[in-house]
Image (cartoon, rainbow, N blue to C red):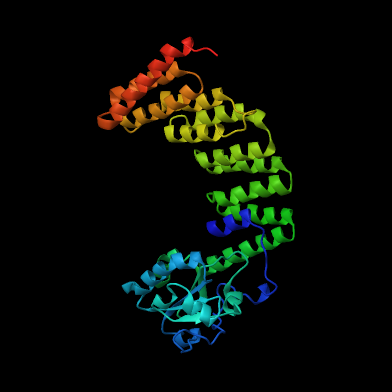
Amino acid sequence: MKKILTLLVISTIIVSKLAAAVATTGDMAPNIPSPIWMDGKVYRIAEYKGKKFVVVFLWAPDQRALAEFQQMNRIARMPANADTAFLSVANCDLETLKKFPGAAKLTFPVCADHNRATAKLYMRSFDRLPLAVVIGKEGRIYWRGSIRQVPAVLKLIRENKFDLPERIRTEKFTLDVSNAIKNKQFDKANKLIYAEWERFPANLELLSMYLLISGRHLKRFDDGFKVIAEAGKKLPGNPEVGVLEFQHICSAGLFNRLDEFSKRMIAVHGSNPDTMTKFASLFIKLPAKELQPRQINAFLSAGWRNGKFKNDAEKANYAINYAKLMHSFGRTDIACKLAIFAEQKLNGKAKASAAEAVTYYKKIIAESSKLAL
């Protein structure tokens, strides 16, 4: 679902005129229409019904497909996939297929489909090539997605752990949302997304999508802040909720909220140095007009003072990064103290690097007051 939702967020959904003909997950898999195969034979998906799983690789003759050929062959040769038939369909004519590098080295039947008839049967509005289609032994479509995920999907199906009804429900949700966005029914889209998020509150991709629509399209930023507050209660201590809130604040242009936000994040996450570094890195990317060095320092200072580090070396590395920022903010004196701490706690090359930093900062402190225009 994550890949599907991300594609919905970052791109305009374009639904084919033949969208109604696209097979739905759970449907019986259509046969490959084109009769033109590289080896001169004809392969029908129906022939494997009751005998084998089937994986169909759909691709176009481009660099993306070329990069996946080795992966396709690797998956087809896996001993665990002896119960699976692999077929491949290229969106091109036979002459183009024969000339395309690597196509002849594929270890399974390859079809030339210059009318893209197979793609029109199998590709949903949000799918992208190369695409893998996994079909069960009873002939139903179980799954469509990245080629690299095929072994894991087949394993789940063999172990009867693949939840086909939930996959069908998820696809319907995704298509309903994509159609609502396509038709600019943003209220409808957000109602669908919110209902799905209530089912799966840990799925922050859903929350991110809701915030994007409520802000960018509906201009109702308050709706987003209300849902963020709900997420904070449902996922206490999850810093990613804070990251989404920061992004929403910036999208709304409400930079005056960042003081309160930073204090709240420090109160909740101040003992986690990685999280403090993460928030500092977000704040440092603010536009120059909105950037507040004191807010950035507040995060790093909290991590330095209250952070639960695994060992001295981890704290020393934190000190080195903190020092670099303090130097860039004109507090080379603080940077030097942090570098001295790091030098004392580190060993080997890391210690030598920290010592060099100490020398550098001391020289800047000693010489900077003598500089003139």
Q: Residue 199 vs residue 150: left or right?
A: right
Q: Name the foreground residue: 42 vs 180.
A: 42
| Vertical arrangement, residue 134 with respect to residue 176, above or below | below
Q: Residue 233 vs residue 220: left or right?
A: left
Q: Name the foreground residue: 320 vs 297.
A: 320
Total count of labels: 0
Q: Name the foreground residue: 277 vs 363.
A: 363
Residue 201 is at least partly visible in this image: no
Quadrant containing the C terminus is top right
Residue 222 is at least partly visible in this image: yes
Q: How far from the left and from the top, in percent, is residue 53? A: 43, 78
Q: How far from the left and from the top, in percent, is residue 28? A: 55, 80
Q: Residue 269 vs residue 337: left or right?
A: right
Q: How far from the left and from the top, in percent, is residue 153? A: 44, 67
| Vertical arrangement, residue 202 with respect to residue 355, above or below | below
Q: Residue 120 vs residue 273: left or right?
A: right
Which quadrant would residue 356 be assigned to in this image? top left
**Which residue is pictured at 63% across the width and 29% down the height?**
290
**Which residue is pictured at 38% across the width and 74% down the height?**
76
Residue pushed farthest front? 373
**Which residue is pictured at 52% across the width and 49% down the height?**
202
Q: Name the foreground residue: 93 vs 31.
A: 93
Quadrant containing the N terminus is bottom right
Which quadrant would residue 11 be assigned to in this image? bottom right
Q: How far from the left and from the top, in percent, is residue 250? A: 64, 37
| Vertical arrangement, residue 354 with respect to residue 155, above or below | above
Which quadrant would residue 181 be assigned to in this image? bottom right
Residue pushed farthest bottom? 41
